[in-house]
Structure formats: C-alpha cells, structure tokens
Amino acid sequence: MMLKKTLLAAAMIAFGGFAASSSAIATTATGSFKVNITILATCNVSAAVGTNDINFGPQNANPTAALDQAQGTPISVTCSNGTPYVVNLTPASTASGSGAGNMVTSPATVNVPYQLRQANGATAAIWGNGGSVTGGVVTLGNGVQGLGTGMTAAKTYTVYATVPSTDFAPNTYSDTVNVSVAY
C-alpha cells in the first residue's frame, strides 16, 4: 500500500509540476497588417500674365528688323519626384502646335507674327505643344522635357520669342500663350 501511496504522490507531484510548468510558459499569438499609401503623380506650373510676359517694347516700323527676345521669360515647373513631364506652349491666337502665333490688336485687323523658341535666336529650336506622356513614356515632339525632383524643387525653363519684321501699322499688339504640363 505504501507503494501505491508513493506512486500516487509521485503522480500528483508530476501532474502538478506539469500544470505549473504549462501555466508558467508564455505563448504568443501573432498577426500582421500593412500600412499603405498611394502617391499620385502631380505637377504644377507657374506662369502668369503680367508676371511672365515677353515684351518686345516699342519698336520702329522696319521691314528688315527681325527681333529676338534676348531676355526670355521664365516658366517654373514642380513635379513629384521621378515624374516625367513635357512643358507645352500654345499661342491662343492660332492654337498652333508649332508655337507660331500672332500678336493682334482690337479689332484684329492686323497680325504681327511671332515664333516661340527654346533658346534665343531665329534659328533656335521652336517650342510648341507637340509633347505628351503616356504610361510614363515621353513623346517629346516640340515641347520641353523634364523629370520631377519633388514638389519643393522647381525647375525653371526660359521661353524666347522671335518676330520676323516690325513693318506693321503703329499700334499695340498682344497675344496670350497657354502653358500646359503633360505628365
């Protein structure tokens, strides 16, 4: 009988020890989740009538006086980091894709032609609105290409204009150029 009591006591101690040891071992259940954000490509352009005008100033009428706007005018572009883009220019008077426009009077009876350019001079590359971006692939056309460096890092591009002659009726002539950024 003593043996039974000893075995029973040993069994109880062993069982109690297992119970004690199983409650002393910590078990961890795990799970996980994601943190997500979708950043969309974004671009802004800074060009404003009155601020970014090309002004040839007063000129004498002359059939051989071709004019280059040597100062140019700045256009600032900000795009999200790594975003490819194209800056396009469209004269309102003609909606020309080649950047050729007409400065007009009111009423528009006489037009003074001009050409938008990427650099100073009558032989510089034209600047029009033939550029596009599709699926991140740039088709340059006659726009000006860039790559975004972040929304706080503006890139400045200078647009120039040429006039083939000043042999027109005395008056003040103007046109508006629309700036767009394809991205």
Image (tube, grey):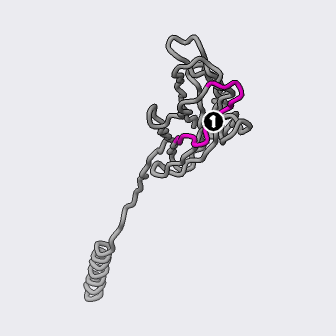
Residues 67 and 41: in front is: 67
The residue stretch that appears in magenta? 61-75
Check disc 1 and give the amino acid type.
Answer: Val
Residues 46 and 9: in front is: 46
Q: Position of residue 64 (x, y in %)?
A: 71, 28
Residues 135 and 129: in front is: 129
Quadrant assignment for the N terminus = bottom left
Is residue 41 magenta-colored?
Answer: no
Left or right of 3? Residue 137 is right
Residue 131 visible at all: no
Left or right of 67? Residue 17 is left
Residue 38 visible at all: yes
Q: Tell me which residue sits at (55%, 22%) in the image.
A: 92
Q: Which residue is label 1 attached to?
A: 133
- Provide the secondary structure element on which disc 1 rests: strand
Q: Tell me which residue sits at (50%, 34%) in the image.
A: 53
Image quadrant assignment for residue 63: top right
Up/down of 113 relative to 180, above or below:
above
Q: Tell me which residue sits at (59%, 17%) in the image.
A: 169
Q: Position of residue 70 (x, y in %)?
A: 61, 42
Up/down of 35 relative to 139, above or below:
below
Image quadrant assignment for residue 16: bottom left
